Image (tube, rainbow, N blue to C red):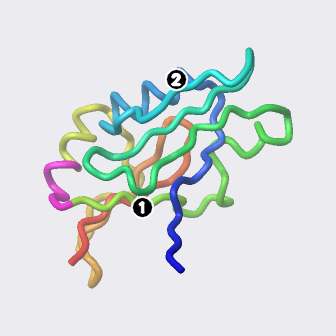
Amino acid sequence: MKQRIAQLALVVRDYDEAIEFYTQKLGFELLEDTRLSEQKRWVRVAPPGDSSCGLLLAKAANEEQAKSIGNQTGGRVFLFLFTDDFWRDYHNLKARNVRFLRPPKEETYGTVAVFEDLYGNKWDLIQPA
């Protein structure tokens, strides 16, 4: 048996603002944007060069879901963006006004810095050692 995680649902306030952030600020590719109904779309984004696991941008459908926007993990780092060149990507993200919460740090597992997305979800940018 072979299994893999194909995508993660990320609850967002608005499809278009989320697409803009992930494609323009983070440089992700828009893999799919299919209208399913008047209210619902199937929107997938992924880092360039690797669509093996992407994000499904899921617009909050009710008040309960809206409460989790930006805090899907209770304030912990939620997503981990691996890179082959930390400093290239760090400087590109800074130039695009992505907000870093913790500065770059050398750890035993690699170089890492924490940034947030447009909703406040925390991400690690990591170049593994």
Which part of the image, by quadrant, shows the C terminus?
bottom left
Q: Residue at x 62, y 21 (%)?
A: 35
The image shows residue 117 at horizontal and vertical percentages of 47, 42
Nearer the observer, 92 or 53: 53
Name the residue at the bottom extreme. Answer: 108
- In the image, taking residue 19 as reference, residue 26 lies left or right, namely left
Q: Residue at x 34, y 39 (%)?
A: 28
Residues in magenta, as a range: 84-89
Q: Main secondary structure of the magenta part?
A: helix
Any magenta on residue 21? no
100 above or below 12?
A: below
Callout 2: helix, strand or loop? helix
Q: Earlier in the sequence, mark 2 or mark 1?
A: 2
Instruction: Answer with the quarter of the image where residue 24 lies.
Output: top left
Residue that label 1 marks: 80
The image shows residue 68 at horizontal and vertical percentages of 73, 46
Instruction: Answer with the quarter of the image where residue 106 lies.
Output: bottom left
Task: Please name the amino acid that badge 1 sits on.
Answer: Phe
Counting the numbered discs, the total is 2
The image shows residue 74 at horizontal and vertical percentages of 68, 60
85 above or below 22?
A: below
Residue that label 2 marks: 17
Q: How far apart in space, not on screen, are marks 2 and 1 (Cα)? A: 21 Å
Q: Residue at x 58, y 38 (%)?
A: 57
The crowd level at tag 1 (other Cα within 10 Å; few <14, some 14-19, many 20+) is few
Nearer the observer, 1 or 79: 1
Task: Please name the amino acid that badge 2 sits on.
Answer: Glu
